[in-house]
Image (cartoon, grey):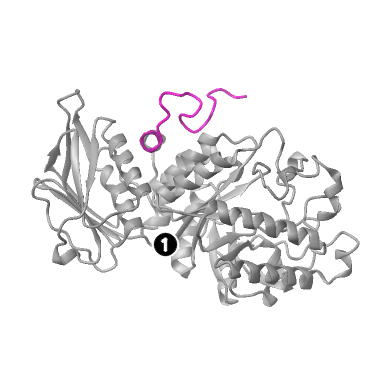
Amino acid sequence: MYLQNCYPTPKFLRENDESGYRFGAVETFLLSRPIGENVGRRMRALWHRFTCTAGVAELAVPYVLRPETDGAITMTIGEEPPAIALSDGDRYAIRADRGGVTLCAVHEKALMEGFSTLVQMIVPENLNEGAEVFFIADTEIHDAPAIGFRSLHLCIFPDSALSTIEKAIHMAGFLKFTHVVLEFWGIYPYECLPKLAWKDRTFTKAQIASLVDAAHSWGMEVIPMINHFGHASSSRVAMGRHSLLNNDLRYSLLFEPDGWTWCLSNPDTKKLLSEMRGELYDLCGDGSYFHLGFDEAYSFATCPKCRRRVPYELLAEYINELTEDICAHGRRPIIWHDELVSPSDFTGAEVMPVANGQNHNTSPALDLLDRRIIIADWEYHYKQEKNASTPYFMEHGFDTIVCPWDEHENIRSLSADAKRLGAMGVMVTTWHHLPGFMPRFPYAANCLWQNEVSPANCPLTEAAALLRRVYDTEGDYASSGWNRFEVEQ
């Protein structure tokens, strides 16, 4: 391989660089059956970038399936490509020798995952125009993830550069994530109420649609997200902004008096949120999930109507109502966990989970909730693989996703917990730290993909090398790298 490591590390990799397959600028790939146009375009782009823009990939279909690969998608390169069979549990397998390369995968998404590994095996030997030579060592790879649901949560702020979000999506796709959560912080131009977005910082629908298309080209599902409880301001609490109420205070009754939390007693609130969800269903395309937020509801049940209700009953009624509606659209709701537990639920825990249910008497709602709900357990301080909250939710009958933030040990520890406990999956969060998180992508991908407990770190230089191959900036300074500046601002 060209870099020191392959990202994420395959389950099994054998490489002998004393022999292998050499090829020139134009290479023809034979596919056993057609693939999606977006995936084909993405594969050609990857091959072009990983051959230092000197190589061109041509895709051709179909050819006769070999008996050992019936039912899978097979891709071959070279005049005499070697045979390779999928072992039990493999998502994809790769074999390279002097005669060529064979990649076999269980389906199209796995083919894209295998191709992302394959291009990392390319070693350029001559880049002079007209005399290009590339080399892939004698290699055998068998690979499959240790965690099935591998998702990335992205916030798009008014201050976000479109290129930053694009780079994150491309890195996630290349590193074999399965889902991307898109949360819009006052930047989406909703037709149902345009004032939900900042008038001077709104992204266009075409720009946002391009992000969705990019995710789909990697075979990732886009999970739309709208906070339906706290964070109703679509702004960080420390900054004092409110994307709607700074536009028009006449919408104040949609929220609790401080504007931070949606008012659950107002039918107009529910109607508006339903219309917003409808727009995001159309934007994000087919999918299985919708993220409803539900964390940090500091001002729940403070308005004159809501304060008359028993808080946990009001909350459970609201969540179950949302669940019925979302499931009717063929999706399952995902909600953050913190308002559904109190410290008293974890007496004796070595590390106390994040628990806010004691603040407004909301933790008893957990027992009343529909079990089709998926709990997103965000625990940003766990580093000891002793997560008490995830098994708690699982024991209560909920599919549970563990959610680390951006510290290496937090990501490693919670990913190990997901494997050990048999949790549904992992959702890596980035919040307002996305530019700083970018060089951590390969490490996080290793934690989510492989079976080893302690994955190797990725040098900053290698993370940058991967980024410039999956995202072409054409020499533009502002969209290169992961920060838009090189001096403190």
Q: Can residue 165 be seen from the camera position used here?
A: yes
| Occupied quadrant, residue 457 | top left
User: In this orientation, which residue lies closer to the viewer: 326 or 13?
Assistant: 326
Q: What quarter of the picture does the C terminus occupy?
A: top right
Kindly give the residue lying farthest to the right in the view shown.
304
Asked whether residue 237 is drawn in magenta, I would say no
Q: Amino acid at mark 1?
A: Ile
**Residue 55 picture location, percent across and down:** 23, 34
Q: Main secondary structure of the magenta part?
A: loop
User: On screen, 95 above or below 70?
Assistant: above
Q: Which residue is mark 1?
A: 147
**Residue 100 picture location, percent across and down:** 13, 47
Q: Can residue 441 be seen from the camera position used here?
A: no
User: In this orientation, which residue lies closer to the viewer: 412 or 49?
Assistant: 49
Q: Residue at x 71, y 57 (%)?
A: 273
Q: Secondary structure at mark 1?
A: loop
User: On screen, 342 above or below 174?
Assistant: below
121 lies left or right of 335: left
User: In this orientation, which residue lies closer to the viewer: 360 or 267?
Assistant: 267
User: On screen, 312 above or below 185?
Assistant: below
Q: Residue at x 61, y 38 (%)?
A: 203
Q: Residue at x 50, y 42 (%)?
A: 210
Image: magenta residue range: 464-489
Other residues around mark 1 within 10 Å, as few (<14) / some (14–19) / many (≥20): many
Asked whether residue 472 is drawn in magenta, I would say yes
